[in-house]
Image (cartoon, helix red, strand yellow):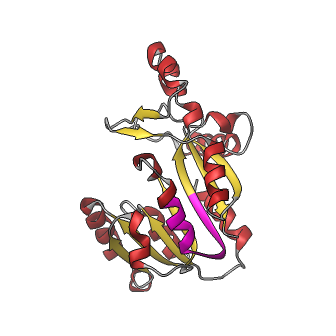
Amino acid sequence: MTRQLDEQIAGRFPVGQRLRVLDVGMGQGTQALRLARAGHKVTGVEQDSAMVAAARDALAAEPEGIRGRVRIVEGDGRETGVHFLPGSFDVVLCHGVLMYVEEPDALLAGLARMLAPGGLLSLLVRNADALAMRPGLAGDWAGAMGAFDSTVYRNRIGLEARADRLDAVSASLAGIAAPLHAWYGVRVFTDGAADDAVPPPEAELTALLAAEERAGRTDPYRRVAALLHVCGVRD
């Protein structure tokens, strides 16, 4: 997904432009730090205090120039209007958050308001059209049958979460004046891998990533990906 995001940024903004980035649900700051190292000014919002602490620790290990380009705000991503003025950011990321929000439209509208005209909204959501894939490939036939018409699932840590269908996300983006610009599949072949799986040797890992990248851009494979990376552009 990193390559997909970089591709969208490169296609929207002049080379070398220092962007204002908002990362909602920044977690431990992996994406925020990567973008700060690339020269962008990044504001991360995270409500989990343990994640905030991890992000601050990771930031503290960076050189001073990078530390100066990152701001961490502990708070709820649904309250961006409390912290920031409309149009304050060129890029807004919301990766792995919407599945835990019961009614996402208000959050999406708030994120769109943060974007300057022509700004990029990058979302990572669970793919409701592929919920039967994981249990089906694991031989859990009852689970697969129950997933076909559902948008609710239980994740690997036991939390109940919500999935989204591409058509619904596209309609929501159109409704908040940030219509769909591009979308990709994420974890087409690797969704069944254990979270603690040891990475394969370098050559195999390179081949795996290349296959995932190709599948994530190609129909029909991307339509059965575990996650969808959806990009909208502010009118």
Of residues 27 and 89, the one drawn nearer to the viewer in this rendering: 89
Is 195 left, or right, of 95 in this rendering? Answer: left
Coordinates of residue 87 in the picture (x, y in percent): 57, 79
Task: Identify the residue at image location x=64%, y=58%.
Answer: 175
Of residues 201 and 153, the one drawn nearer to the viewer in this rendering: 153
Task: Identify the residue at image location x=66%, y=50%.
Answer: 170
Residue 215 in which image quadrant: top right
Task: Identify the residue at image location x=30%, y=71%.
Answer: 56
Total labels: the figure holds: 0
Coordinates of residue 159 in the picture (x, y in percent): 33, 38
Task: Identify the residue at image location x=66%, y=48%.
Answer: 184
Coordinates of residue 204 in the picture (x, y in percent): 58, 39
Say above or below: 12 vs 47. below
**Residue 207 is a magenta residue:** no
Q: Is residue 39 visible?
A: no
Of residues 112 and 136, the one drawn nearer to the viewer in this rendering: 112
**Residue 115 is a magenta residue:** yes
Q: Is residue 135 visible?
A: yes
Is 190 left, or right, of 216 in this rendering? Answer: left
Is 198 left, or right, of 37 in this rendering? Answer: left
Of residues 212 and 47, the one drawn nearer to the viewer in this rendering: 47
Q: Which residues are magenta?
A: 107-122
Residue 180 in which image quadrant: bottom right
Quadrant including the C terminus: bottom right
Coordinates of residue 226 in the picture (x, y in percent): 54, 37
